[in-house]
Image (cartoon, grey):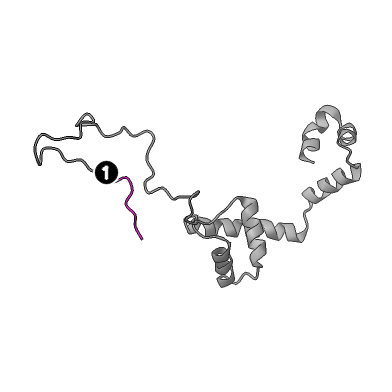
């Protein structure tokens, strides 16, 4: 219906609906719902804002079970699956440690200049205590 809304000034509503094989009542019903949404949709919009705030406060780590628990503690009677649906719609996801999703240990500044290579990639030393090299790119923590 958004496509019809975008093309209606150029081609008109009826020809676009005819090409898409959509009844005009469907389009005008969609417009009426957009202008005056039902109570459930308005509540969902308000709840989505609260869910996003809880998710942001948690640093993006809370998934739907924890967000649901926080809402319950705040006195909001809402279903867990409704929270899941609203989080999915908003593109919010909790942190989980699996192979595909990692929290970077360091957020590097792309504008920062890298440290100079003082040994010119020569990692062998002529004598002990002449060259010290370390790599602290990832330090696992509990």
Question: Which of the 4 image quadrants contains residue 52?
Answer: bottom right
Q: Nearer the viewer, residue 37 or 86?
A: 86
Residue 48 is a magenta residue: no
Residue underneath mark 1: 135
Q: Residue at x 32, y 52 (%)?
A: 139
Q: x%, y% of residue 135?
A: 27, 43
Over which residues does the magenta segment extend?
Answer: 137-142
Question: Which of the 4 image quadrants contains residue 39?
Answer: bottom right
Badge 1 marks a residue whose secondary structure is loop
Q: Residue at x 64, y 66 (%)?
A: 80
The answer to whether residue 122 is left or right of residue 64 is: left
Please state, as top left, top right, bottom left or bottom right, where the C terminus lies in the image: bottom left
In this rendering, the answer to whether 98 lies above or below 115 is: below
In this rendering, the answer to whether 24 lies above or below 65 is: above
The answer to whether residue 141 is left or right of residue 100 is: left
Q: x%, y% of residue 6?
A: 77, 34
The answer to whether residue 128 is left or right of residue 15 is: left
Count of numbered labels shown in the rendering? 1
Label 1: how many Cα within 10 Å (few below 14, some 14–19, many 20+): few
Q: x%, y% of residue 2?
A: 76, 39
Q: Nearer the viewer, residue 82 or 35?
A: 82
Q: Nearer the viewer, residue 88 or 99?
A: 99
Please state, as top left, top right, bottom left or bottom right, where the N terminus lies in the image: top right
Q: Main secondary structure of the magenta part?
A: loop
Q: Residue at x 65, y 52 (%)?
A: 89
Q: x%, y% of residue 122?
A: 20, 31
């Amino acid at each position: 219906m958004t496509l019809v809304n975008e093309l209606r000034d150029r081609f008109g509503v009826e020809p676009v609906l005819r090409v898409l094989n959509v009844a005009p009542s469907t389009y005008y019903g969609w417009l009426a719902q957009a202008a005056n949404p039902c109570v459930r949709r308005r509540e969902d919009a308000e709840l989505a804002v609260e869910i996003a705030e809880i998710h942001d406060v948690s640093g993006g780590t809370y998934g739907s079970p924890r967000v649901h628990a926080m809402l319950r503690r705040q006195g909001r009677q809402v279903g867990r699956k409704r929270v899941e649906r609203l989080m999915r719609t908003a593109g919010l996801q909790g942190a989980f440690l699996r192979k595909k999703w990692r929290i970077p240990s360091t957020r590097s500044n792309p504008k920062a200049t890298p440290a100079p290579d003082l040994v010119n990639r020569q990692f062998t030393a002529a004598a002990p205590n002449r060259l010290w090299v370390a790599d602290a790119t990832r330090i696992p923590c509990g």
